[in-house]
Structure formats: structure tokens, C-alpha cells
Image (cartoon, rainbow, N blue to C red):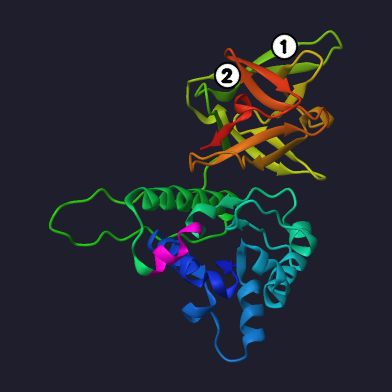
Amino acid sequence: MPSHVMLSYQWDDQALVKKIYNRLKEDGLPVWMDIEGGVTGNINDSMAAGVEEACVICPFMTPAYQASRSCKKELNYADSREVPVVPVMLANDWEASEWLGLITAGLLWVDFSVAQEHRKRVRLSLRLENDEEHFEMRLRSLEEEIMFIAGHLLEVEKPAREEVDLPEPSKPHLKKKPGRRFRHALSDLYIYDLGEQDEQSTGDTRNTVALNQTLGDQCYWVEVKGDGCKYYRNAVTDRYLGFDPSSEQVHSEASPSMSEEWLLLADQTDQSHQRAVVIKNKHSGRFLAVQNGHFIGLTSYNEDCKWFLE
């Protein structure tokens, strides 16, 4: 039975990955790393066992990782066993290609590229306070993505509070959320299924999807894998998020079709260190955006297309 999160990395990035390993362990996640007891005896047997017992694998992507035969062997084996992949990007202004691009295509990666720029500072413990804050935000993004992908398979321990002279707030216990929640970066509005039906002239029945400041389970969308796309099913109404390019209306339907096919990608322009993404309708090619408090589909990216995952 898969039991851990496997960290796959190229040797040059060991210091940063070790720091991430320590923090994931502190927060209660079962994590596997080669230098932390993962490799005993024959290295190939140990690496194979690490993959076979993983419920998710995190490749730390760089050009050196892509060029590494060992890393290629690890991730290809994980892919052949259909182990879910949560990619971590360490390189700036670079995209994975060849075998690595093929395996990670369409996956939402977590951006640690700023942390990579300060790798020497990590080794010397000379990170500035704002750098550490950004690291914590990105670590939280990684934990959330791991829990979203494999939270139902992981046994997460409640973080133990250390005995200190001054009381500190306890760390939050990691739990799998009902789905993804999308908050628009500029308006702070959430995509929300009202559960109200809107009868169409074609006879189809659609639910009204609105932008709302109200939080609740109807803001959560369960991600369902499609053929080169994702479908988003509302956690309460069980209806699929869709977009009509002719009317620029966002709706939900009882079953998915081409208008409910989406691409979810990391927003590479974002500098906020939050989980910034863009949501693109595969069928129409439009970016889901908000202008003046209303949905709109844009043919090219601008700041109105930016969303945060929560």
C-alpha cells in the first residue's frame, strides 16, 4: 500500500530539498528522501522500493535534473506505475522538454525558483526574513498540492508542539480539502455555483455560476482528469464548470462536454509567491477572466486572468 511522498532531485539541489524534506516531516507528512534512510543496500533496489511505496512523487525540475540518467530512471518508473506527480520548479526562465516535458505536461507545478536563487544562502543560513517568508508560502503551496492529489492516501500526523517558554500557536493539521477553490487575484471574488437553474432556449438546463465573496462548500470544485484536460465538478451540486464563448457565460452542467474542458496552468508572471494560476477553456481557447465584477473570456493573457488557489 503506497505510504509516502517521494522527493526526486538532482544532487546539486540537495541542500534545498533537504530543507523542504525537514519541513514536510515537521508538518506531519510521511516523506522519503534517499539520504534520509531511503537508500539501504543496493541503490537500484532502494530507489525502486521508494517509487513502489510512493503515493505521490515530487520531481525538483532543473536542466540538470532533465539531463540526469538516474532522475530519468526514477520518474519514468513512477510514471509507468501511474504514481501521481507533483512537479516542483527550481529553474528560472526554463521549461521542461524531452522526456521530462512529456511526463509533466499539463501538470500544475509549484514554483520554488526564487528559493533556488538563494540556494547558497540556505546552506549558510543567511536567508533574509522576506526570503524565509516566501519559502514558507511556497512550502504551504507544495503541501496543499500534495494533499489535494494524495491526501486520501497519506497518514498525516498531527504536528507536535515543542515545549517553549512562550506559547506559540499550533501548526494547522494538514487535511484534504473538498476540491480546488479559485479566488480572482484582482477582485477577491470566488467562482461559486449558486445551484439555481437557468433554462436555455435549446432545452438544456444549466446552473448559474457566479462570482461571490461568500465562502462555502459551493466554492469548491473537484478536479477530474480528462483527455488532455481537466473537468471541475462542484463539491455540492455535482455539476461541471463550463464556459459558453458566444455569450461569455460561465455555467455548470450535469455532465461534462467540450465546453467543460479546462487547462489549469501555473502563472509564470506572478511575483506574489502565492498559488497563482490561469484557467483556460480548452475548447474555445479563452482565458477565464474577470472585468468589472463579471466573467469574461479573453484571447490573450493579462492581469484580469490571474487566479489564486486556496
Image quarter for residue 121? bottom left
Q: Whole-percent x and y of residue 308?
A: 54, 35
Q: Whole-percent x and y of residue 100?
A: 74, 62
User: Nearest the camera: 111 or 123?
Assistant: 123
| Left or right position of 180 against 170 | right
Residue named by callout 2: 211
| Left or right position of 287 against 268 | right
**Is residue 173 in sight in this rendering?**
no
User: Nearest the camera: 39 or 3?
Assistant: 39
Relative vertical location of residue 294 with respect to residue 259 in this rendering, above or below? above
Relative vertical location of residue 204 with respect to residue 265 in this rendering, above or below? above
Residue named by callout 1: 198
Image quarter for residue 222? top right
- Highlighted magenta segment, given as a residue range: 117-123
Identify the amino acid type marked 1.
Asp
**Is residue 306 in sight in this rendering?**
yes
What secondary structure is the magenta-colored segment mainly?
A: helix
Q: Whole-percent x and y of residue 113?
A: 54, 54
In this view, the residue farthest toward the top is 201
Q: How many marks?
A: 2
- Going from N to C along the chain, the mark reached first, 1 or 2, is 1
